[in-house]
Structures are given as C-alpha cells and as structure tokens.
Amino acid sequence: MQCQLPYIPKRLHSFGKHIIEEFFIGEELYYRCKLGQCSKPYLSISLYDVSHNRNFNDSKLYPKEDVLFDINENTDIEQIENKDISISVIKSLSQNNTFEKEIISDDDPDIIVNIKLIHSPVPCMYSHCAFQISLKDDIITKENYSKTLGKKPKVYKNLRRDIRIELTSIIYSSVIDNNSETEIITDL
Amino acid sequence: MENSLNNLTNDLFLRQSELFGEDYEETGHIHTFNDLSISDLDDWFNSVLTKFDFLNEIQIKSFQNFVIKLNYVLRQIDPNKLKINDDSVEDSDLLLWRESDKGISMITFDEFGQIAYNYVGKNGKKVKGVFNQDVDMEKLLYKFISM
C-alpha cells in the first residue's frame, strides 16, 4: 500500500522497501511524548503500542523530527504539536541484533512476557519501529489487551509494572541495553 | 471529622511505636522540621485519600504507615527537599514518586495490598522489590528517599 499523505516526504514512504530486522549499535530511537513527560514516562507509557522511529544510524536521512508527522490518514493534521521527543541510543543487542527482553512472572514462572524491538514500517513511515510485547503466544494489541496482559489478577498487575519499568528505563536513561539486569531487593 | 479521626489514629500508632513512642509521651505532640511541616503532612494524607477515593482499607493502612514513618523522618529533613509526588496507576493503585539527580524512586500501594518499590536510574540501573504489609516501612522509606 502506498502512502497517500501529500506532506510526507518520499524518503519516508515504505512502498517497495524491505523490513530491516537487525538494529545497530549506536542507532537512535525516537519516541514522541507529551510535553514534560519524557523525563517521567512511567504513567503515560502504553503496554500495547510502544511506537518509536529508528534512524538506521543515519540522522540526516531519518531525523528525529520525523516522529512528529501525523501519519493518521483520517486526520487533517500534518505535524503533531506540543510534544517532546525522547532519544534513546542502542548500547547492546541480543544475538539476533535486536532488543529482546524476557520477563518471567515472580508469581508464576510459567507466565512469561517478551519485549522485542521490531522494525514495523507503515505506508507513510518507513522508519517506524515498536517494542512488541507478547504474553505466551499472544502479541498484545489494543483489541486483546483486556483479555491478555490487562487481566485483573495480581500476577498480571505485577507483570504490567515490570514492563512499565523496563520501558521507562529505556526512555528515562536514553539507553537501550539488552544486557541490563534488575536488582531485586527482598530484605526489608 | 475525618481529619480528627486521622489524627487520633496517628496518635494511637505513635503512642504504640517502639521507635518514637517515648518521644511522644514526653512531649505530648510531635515535633517535626517545623510546625508547618506536620500540618502539611496531615493535609497531604487527607488530600491523597480524597484525590484517590478508590483506595481500599489495606492501601489506606499501608499509606498511613508510610506517612507515620515519614513524619519521623521530617524531624531531620526539610520536607521541601523530599518533593514527593502522588499519582494513580490503573485507577486502582496509589503511586508515590520522587526524582533525585540520579533517578526516580517509586512506591506503589496496589489494590492487592502489595507495596512495590522501584527505582530507575539515569544510568540505566533498575531496582525492584515487592512486599506485603509486614514490610519494614522505615527501611523502605529510607530506600525511597536515599536513592
């Protein structure tokens, strides 16, 4: 499908371009957040649509400001206003050359969440990527959220908090580090 | 009325406190960094209960325990330096958070009675702990304000 929005530059059109599954050390990811919220993203972060733009280590061709383009074809807005841009830099990657983090439930070790950074171009934004969250075999979406990760029991509440912390850390520290660990305190 | 009841409950807790019950008996009231701070703390406690009226009994009790310990800490620290913020998560949990020049500390009093501590550092450091109501609130508070 081709991009129909006239204000989107050709360089951002996805048509005819390949998905690049690998990410690169030093590559920058850009995240659009409410004014003043980039420094404290915990409360506003979504658990099913954690969209970013990537720059393929080419900030001239893919500048951070691209993340402000409105790519929703149902609106008449070109640029999304009153937003800040958070920049995160990739420091380390998994063997698959992406960011992959497994969160095992403290309450039930059979319940595992995966967070994976994927390149997911959309017609008007080739550089679009996302932290894809999956629970068992379900990729979490707005539609299935309440029946999957958003379920009421304590085990899911704790998982959601762990995911928020993981994503908050990426945005807050401006670093994507596949090797980062969480220190667990128990002696209080 | 609500305020008086809370004061009464606080007094009861303080009288029974091994840590500063003795001080309480001596003075008959609590001295903090200044007289204003204790009234602020009381007001803050009440405002949180009003603002987040979904909090259940266990959450209120845990939060009250936190405030009581905070009251003690305010003898030594100017409350303005602590800058504790309150928010809600998922319309069911109370989140207290503060930012230092190193990172963000968070305490969540969730709807299940759990008290979760999290820290996210500017250097990427992450710390977590999930406790029940038996947690040593003084130690938790210390961690919260020292990170």
Image (cartoon, rainbow, N blue to C red):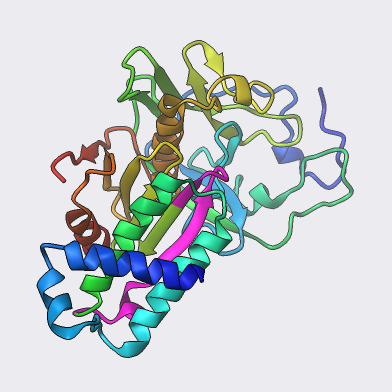
Q: Quarter-wise, where is residue A93 in the image?
A: top left
Q: Nearer the viewer, residue A184 or A8?
A: A184
* Left or right of residue B17: residue B54: right
The percent coordinates of residue A134 (x first, y second) are 50, 20
Q: Nearer the viewer, residue B99 or B91?
A: B91
Q: Residue at x 46, y 75 (%)?
A: B43
Is residue A35 visible from the viewing direction of this image?
yes
In the figure, A145 relative to A66: above or below?
above
Q: Answer whether residue B89 is magenta in the image.
A: yes
Q: Residue at x 77, y 39 (%)?
A: A10
The percent coordinates of residue A138 (x first, y second) are 55, 14
| Image quadrant where one finds the N terminus of chain A | top right
* Left or right of residue A22: residue A49: right
The percent coordinates of residue A117 (x first, y second) are 48, 29
Is residue A173 visible from the viewing direction of this image?
no
In the figure, B45 relative to A71: above or below?
below
The residue stretch that appears in magenta: B76-94
Q: Residue at x 21, y 38 (%)?
A: A184
In the figure, A119 relative to B32: above or below?
above
Q: Answer whether residue A13 is magenta in the image.
A: no
In the figure, A55 relative to B106: above or below?
above
* Left or right of residue B107: residue B46: right
Q: Nearer the viewer, residue B97 or A121?
A: B97
* Left or right of residue A143: residue A168: left
The percent coordinates of residue B125 (x first, y second) are 26, 48
Q: Residue at x 37, y 63 (%)?
A: B98
- Label total for image: 0
Q: Nearer the viewer, residue B115 or A58?
A: B115
